[in-house]
Image (spheres, helix red, strand yellow):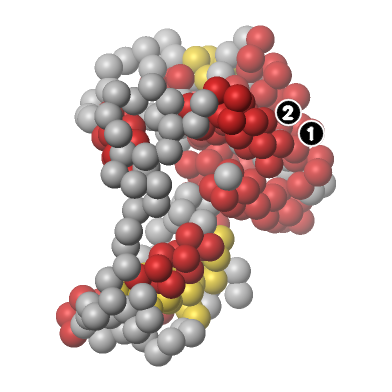
Amino acid sequence: MSQVKAVQAAFDRFATHCAARVRRCPTGDGPEEAARRMARLADRLKKKPAPAGGGRKLDADDLAYAVSDHLVLGTDGWSPLAKALTALIDHNDGGPLSKGADLLGSAERAAPPSDSSRAALSAITCADSSLRPGFERLDRDEARVKAASPVFGAAWSSGVYLCYDWPFDGERVTPQVNADGAAPVLVVGGTGDPTTPYPGARHMARALGDGVGMLLTAEEEGHDTYPRNRCVTKAVDTYLRTGHTPAAGTVCRGTMS
């Protein structure tokens, strides 16, 4: 749930920027209009996927994953995303957008996976948690995910069923990460991260234990604050070389500052 809210928030910030800075912005005059336009586009792609080059097609789920992958790049992905959405909306050309489509999107389903990433995702996720809710609970969770994000909810919602019939038990309800007595562990969290939301980094730092989990906050769009943010890069490099962490409460300014 937190991830779908984070990626929706990142898209809303893109839509706000696009409305203010891009001539003929494909998402309109702000987040609300962007959500309406994306809903219409998704409906169109459900009925008839767009050509994406090389015999591939781009459908509604691919749309969500590809937009998300552009947002992972932070502000560097905003201009390419605006251009790709314009090509898709105005010319029914899914090629530019499909280049960023995630492997979970159906644009890649026709070809065998080039690595074991999909299998690893399922195995690791289901090994981490022993929770195996029944269909009634999962159906409610699916509805909640859909409602949490007008742009990404439908595509993300199927993930709630990932471990439903996984044949092996998970280790525990919640993985134990407490490391009392260990050397300090540097945890970096980006406030605009659409993939690993900032509240998760804050929770991880607390769960590691007092004096162990040391949170470095980056006011940065996108997923990879290292090495894009100089302040983060300096802090991480220092930690890896010396074991020293930044002072508690340190904030690295960035694109969201």
Q: Which residue is mark 2?
A: 39
Query: In this image, 44 relative to 222: left or right?
Result: right
Task: Find residue 167 and report its horizontal and vertical position in percent.
Answer: 29, 24
Q: Report which quarter residue 244 is drawn in.
A: bottom left
Q: Residues within 10 Å of mark 1 (few under 14, many from 20)?
A: some
Is residue 227 in view from this perspective? no
Give residue 36's mark: 1
In the image, what residue occupies the spot 52% across and 26% down?
134
Is residue 205 in view from this perspective? yes
In the image, what residue occupies the spot 44% across and 14% down?
56
Q: Amino acid at mark 2?
A: Ala
Vertical order, 167 against 211 (above or below): above
Q: Dot 1 lies on which element? A: helix
Q: Along the line of sight, which residue is nearer the eye, 125 or 27? A: 125
Query: In this image, 77 relative to 181: left or right?
Result: right
Q: Are marks 1 and 2 in contact (CB under 8 Å)?
A: yes
Vertical order, 241 against 112 (above or below): below
Q: Dot 2 lies on which element? A: helix
Using the numbered discs, state the Cα–Cα distance from disc 1 to disc 2 in whole angstroms. 5 Å
In the image, what residue occupies the spot 18% across and 85% down?
242
Query: In this image, 236 relative to 257: left or right?
Result: left
Task: Find residue 48 and report its horizontal and vertical position in percent.
Answer: 63, 10
Q: Along the line of sight, which residue is nearer the eye, 106 or 211? A: 211
Q: Residues within 10 Å of mark 2 (few under 14, many from 20)?
A: some
In the image, what residue occupies the spot 71% across and 36% down?
147
Q: Report which quarter residue 1 is drawn in.
A: top right
Task: Find residue 241 and report its horizontal and vertical position in percent.
Answer: 17, 80
